[in-house]
Amino acid sequence: MSEALFQNVLVPYDGSELSEFATPYAAEIARRSCGRITLVRALPEPAIVTDIPRKLLLQVTATARKELEDAGGRVDGVPVKTLLVEGLPGDVVQREAKKCDLIVMTTQGRGGVSRLVLGSVTERV
């Protein structure tokens, strides 16, 4: 078989139910092209969250790591790499995308004021 068209499929993961929807599609694409999936999750940088106690930040990190590893464990038939990276979600996805062939992600579908205030990682990427 020739070289895989999509050797590395990036799936941004935030622990939400909606982000779970992208994984089966990414897995099918990776399976058909003999590739792998990289699940990436962004964590706030310590410099940004100075008001959050260190103990709470460690708990958030541990929970995020477990959710990410659990999500990777639910993928069958293709290799999965999980990454927990500090930074803003849009920045993290853009950096990791440079190492990948395809991004499979969902969007919240926000509009109006909430989109203006909260932004859209999907739109930024």
Image: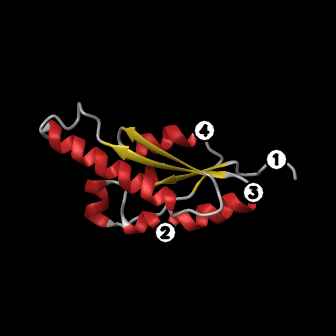
Q: Which amino acid is tagged 4?
A: Lys
Residue 107: image quadrant is bottom left
- Whichever of labels 1 and 2 marks the residue nearer the N terminus, that label is 1
Q: Could you give the CA–CA distance between mark 2 and mark 3, rounded to whole angstroms?
A: 20 Å
Element at label 1: loop
**3D distance between C-alphas at marks 3 and 1:** 8 Å
Q: Nearer the viewer, residue 15 or 101?
A: 15
Q: Is residue 17 left or right of residue 25?
A: left
Density class for disc 4 (Cα within 10 Å; few <14, some 14-19, many ≥20) is few
Q: Which mark is residue 21?
A: 2
Circle nearer the viewer, 3 or 4: 3
**Residue 94 x %, y %:** 49, 42
The residue positioned 67% from the left and 57% from the top of the image is: 30
Q: Which residue is mark 4?
A: 99
Q: Quadrant of residue 116?
A: bottom left
Pointer 3 with pointer 4, Cβ within 8 A: no
Q: CA distance from mark 3 to mark 4?
A: 17 Å
Identify the residue shown where x is 74% and y is 55%.
Answer: 34
Callout 3: SS: loop
Q: Secondary structure at mark 4?
A: loop
Q: Which residue is mark 1?
A: 3
Residue at mark 3 = 33
Decide which of 115, 10 is in the foreground and name it: 10
